[in-house]
Image (cartoon, grey):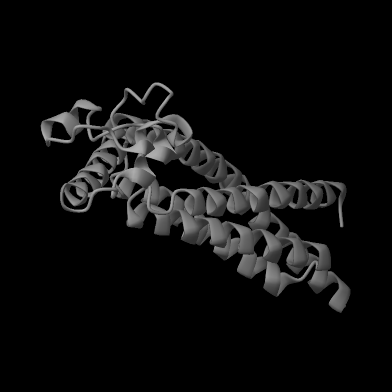
Amino acid sequence: MGCTSGCVKCLLNIINTLNALVGLSMIAIATIALSKAPLLYIAFLYGLGGLIFVSAILGCCGICQENVCLTVTYAFVLLVQLIISLVGSFGLNFSEKYIEKFAAEEVQRKWELELVEPGAMDTFQQVYECCGRGGPDDYVDIGRTTLPKSCYPQEDTKMPHFLSGCVQKSSQSFVVLYNYANDTHWVSVAITSLMVIAAFYLVGRFRKQRIRYSY
């Protein structure tokens, strides 16, 4: 094994480690965002994150053992991973406006439930530190004489109530999660592109080495 191939092996193993962490981080973000983002977006993060993590483990095994079959499989998995990442980025219409729209619709569903089942908004209001759909005045508009305890920090009615509506606060929270996931995703695309090139290079080197040792 030449010096160049040895360097590529070391580089790939380092990148595999980073890639595994990126995959786990995407899975973690998807878990945090459960019920806070569109189901298709969550499924995309879970699927891609899992594929990244599995490919990283497969790559480490193939490269360390200099196994042609494992390394070829690893290279093609990386290629599929790269294609899925690019299709997901350009094919799925996720944007901040889309995420904000989803958040507003989710709050609207909770608010409509609040009208018939008082307390339906409590979880939203405590999690996002908000009050009402668009603000505390929403409760006045529907004839409530007092604000629910969930509109106060730690449900302490002696403290000032939250002033922001849940549409605004939940949208901000969703967008933060989306932007972080999106940044992580593009880091993964860049890393995967380098890994595809390096993996196919090693496949060629491993095959040449196998042929040379067979004589």
Looking at the image, how many numbered discs can be counted on the residues? 0
Residue nearest the viewer, comparing 204 with 114: 114
Give x and y (percent) for residue 50: 55, 61
The residue sitting at 21% across, 53% down in the picture is 117
The residue sitting at 28% across, 29% down in the picture is 165
Give x and y (percent) for residue 172: 37, 30
Is there any visible trace of residue 174 in the rendered image? no
Is there any visible trace of residue 70 in the rendered image? yes
The residue sitting at 70% across, 63% down in the picture is 57
Instruction: Name above or below for residue 202 compared with residue 148.
Output: below
Q: Quadrant of the C terminus?
A: bottom right
Residue at the far bottom in the pictured view: 214
Instruction: Name above or below for residue 35 compared with residue 134.
Output: below
Give x and y (percent) for residue 157: 40, 29
Instruction: Name above or below for residue 102 compared with residue 60.
Output: above
Instruction: Write down the quadrant of residue 43 in the picture.
Output: bottom left
Indicate left or right for 193 with 202 as reference: left
Give x and y (percent) for residue 169: 35, 31
Instruction: Write down the quadrant of residue 83 in the picture.
Output: bottom left
Indicate left or right for 45 with 135 as reference: right
The residue sitting at 34% across, 57% down in the picture is 39
Instruction: Name above or below for residue 174 compared with residue 43.
Output: above
Residue nearest the viewer, comparing 214 with 25: 25
Residue nearest the viewer, comparing 204 with 150: 150
Indicate left or right for 98 with 173 as reference: left
